[in-house]
Image (cartoon, rainbow, N blue to C red):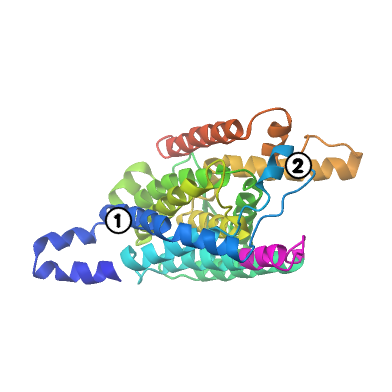
Amino acid sequence: MLYELLYSLYVYFTPFNVFRYITFRTALAALTAMVITFIIAPRIIKWLKRISMTQQIRDDGPKSHLSKAGTPTMGGIIIIISIVLSMMMWGNLTSIYNWMVLVSLVGFGLIGFIDDYLKAVKKNPKGLRGWYKFGGQVAIASAVSVFLYMNPEDPYNSVLSIPFFKKWLIDLGMFYIPFSVLVIVGSSNAVNLTDGIDGLAIGLVAIAALVNGALVYLSGHAVFAKYLQVIYIAGIGELTVFCGALLGASLGFLWYNAYPAQVFMGDVGSLGLGGALGTLAVVTKHEIVLAVVGGIFVIETLSVVLQVASYKLTGRRIFKMAPIHHHFELKGWSEPKVIVRFWIVGVILALFSLATLKLR
């Protein structure tokens, strides 16, 4: 919106031509989202405290977490508002790809909002019923997947690309729709499971936003895509601006979510951000790379699956507690140590995922 207005002025003043460049608008989106976060976060945190929107702490987890009782939750509202406002200013609103990730961000965030509301206000420890929650996620992911599958502007709408291979493309046909749903819903819940200690999930989301920004920009640039032998999709580069907004909002929120947290993002944030990351991967055909970039998210999810399966089949637990970050806490690692070490692994995986672009 603001971008289109300012860019149109270049006929009167040439320097305004700079607004046509995606890289420039991405930087502006990141800074804008961060500034908006710093402006609205203190007010929203006070409001959440006033209406008693606080986190319920599990009594079977690490005892150090009991002191966090009373910390406001649903801080993900801050992130979503910052991203949406930043995109309204610097994003290309004629891009269907921008609208797809925004639909996922807000749609999954709304499901999380309802879940958080039921837990915090209605004092329902289970929150939104599992089938309603999962059904809502599948419905939104299905709508996005069907739209992308039927998009006539994307010649690769049913193709799965394999990292490390230049031209190994698998056409899944209509099966790409359920596959995309699995990626989007899986990503949303993986981030949700990782959001268990201060700053862990949002820090990893920031790392993923940075890497996805690079992947999206390269995929949307005809020359770079041809050189790196990655799928080129016209117009996809506009999503780089979204990644910038996501990065800025994540870093801004981390200021308040860093240990000891002043606010938790809640399901409204984790489900929304996870859904957006999954949609980014589907749109850019980097679904497998997402599993590498978000390797920690994958490990956290697998730890829960293995724990539940082992307990039901053998009556024994593999980990002291799942998700796995709690396992390390119960082994004696301090919370900041778990967070920083998981971030380090996240950075290593992010660098490896970027290496897949050249190793083809």
Q: Is residue 169 left or right of residue 180?
A: left
Judged from the image, the secondary structure of the residue bearing numbered disc 2 is loop
Q: Where is residue 334 in the image (x, y as percent from the top left)?
A: 64, 31
Residue that protrudes farthest toward the front in the picture = 50
- What mark, if any, has residue 28 been given in the picture? 1
Q: Which amino acid does label 2 sit on?
A: Gly
Magenta-span inclusion, residue 194: no
Q: Name the residue under label 2.
A: 61
Q: Where is residue 281 in the image (x, y as percent from the top left)?
A: 50, 53
The N terminus is located in which quarter? bottom left
Note whether residue 184 is visible: yes
* Label whose residue precedes the other's in the sequence (2 or 1): 1
Measure the alpha-carbon separation of dots 2 and 1: 41 Å
What range of the chain is rendered magenta? 111-130
The C terminus is located in which quarter? top left
Q: In this view, does 324 lie above or below 241?
A: above
Residue depth check, mark 2 versus mark 1: number of the one nearer the observer:
2
Note whether residue 155 is visible: no
Magenta-span inclusion, residue 119: yes
Q: Quadrant of residue 179?
A: bottom right
Q: In this view, does 242 lie to the left or right of 68?
A: left
